[in-house]
Image (spheres, rainbow, N blue to C red):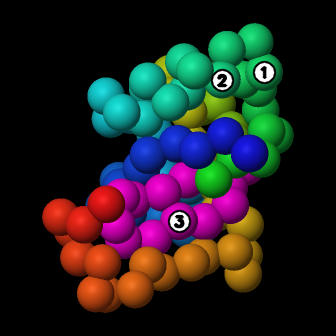
Amino acid sequence: MHRIMFDTNDGDGQFGYQLVFADSLKDLAAIGDDLRDGLRVIIYMPQELEMEAVLKFDPKAGIWLGLPVAGTTKIYPEELGPSSN
């Protein structure tokens, strides 16, 4: 499954998370010809959490959104911390 960086501060679980950061756009570009509405991916915040999501393009805003799939959120253990890899 493709992985796309996101930030929980840029959207919400109901309407989706905006995939607009430089790393998000890089991850989306790497999908190439497979990029499409309805594609199931993993969206993640490094060293914090990840979840499965369904991609949706918002033509009005010209951006991709990640719509979370309920019950798939994984919180990374706190001991990993933001600087651990």
The magenta span reads 43-54
Question: Is residue 49 one of those drawn in magenta?
Answer: yes
Residue pointed to by mark 2 = 31
Q: CA distance from mark 1 to mark 3?
A: 21 Å
Which residue is more in the foreground, 14 or 43? Answer: 43
Question: Farthest residue in the left direction?
Answer: 83
- Residue 4: horizontal and vertical position, in percent? 52, 42
Q: Position of 76 compared to 30: left or right?
A: left
* Earlier-in-chain disc, 3 versus 2: 2
In the displayed structure, 37 sits above or below 70; it is: above
The residue under the point 40% across, 86% down is 77
**Quadrant of the image occupied by residue 67:** bottom right
Residue pointed to by mark 1 = 34
Q: CA distance from mark 2 to mark 1?
A: 6 Å
Residue pointed to by mark 3 = 50
Which residue is more in the foreground, 47 or 52? Answer: 47
- The C terminus appears in which quarter of the rendering? bottom left
In the displayed structure, 67 sits above or below 18; it is: below
